[in-house]
Image: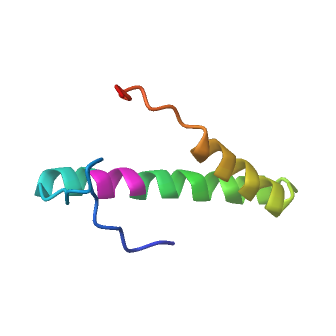
Amino acid sequence: MMNTFPKWHDKNGQLIACTEKIKVMQENMTELQQMAQDAFEDALLMGCDENQVRAFLQTLMASLNNPYNLD
């Protein structure tokens, strides 16, 4: 599993420096990674094709909607 996180930036490229925001991001990403890993393992145990599951998870992430997009 991924143990390192990027330095988070805002939409203008400025570094997110708030310790609490960074902590929340890391906790959220860790939780998401664990949930995705569990779902992936379940799919493999049920006999699903690994490449298809990986492709679906990538498509799922790419399809996330930004409800805050005000541009």
Residue 63 vertical position relative to residue 5 in the rendered view, above or below: above
x and y percentages locating residue 23 in the rendered image: 22, 56
* 6 vs 1, nearest the viewer: 6
Kindly identify the residue that appears in the image at 31 percent across and 58 percent down: 26
Which quadrant is home to the C terminus? top left
Residue depicted at 72% across the width and 54% down the height? 42
Q: Where is 21 relative to 37, above or below?
A: above
Magenta-highlighted residues? 25-29
Q: Is residue 4 left or right of residue 18?
A: right
Residue at the spot x=59%, y=45% of the render? 62
The reply, left or right, for residue 27 in relation to residue 43 is left
Residue 69: percent from left, percent from top: 38, 29
Residue 23 belongs to the span the image colors magenta: no
4 with respect to 16 (left or right):
right
Name the residue nearer the viewer: 66 or 1. 66
Is 44 displayed left or right of 11 in the figure? Answer: right
- Magenta residues, dominant SS class: helix
Q: Position of residue 61 (x, y in %)?
A: 58, 46
Residue at image location 40% in from the left, 74% down from the top: 3
Task: Identify the coloring.
Answer: rainbow
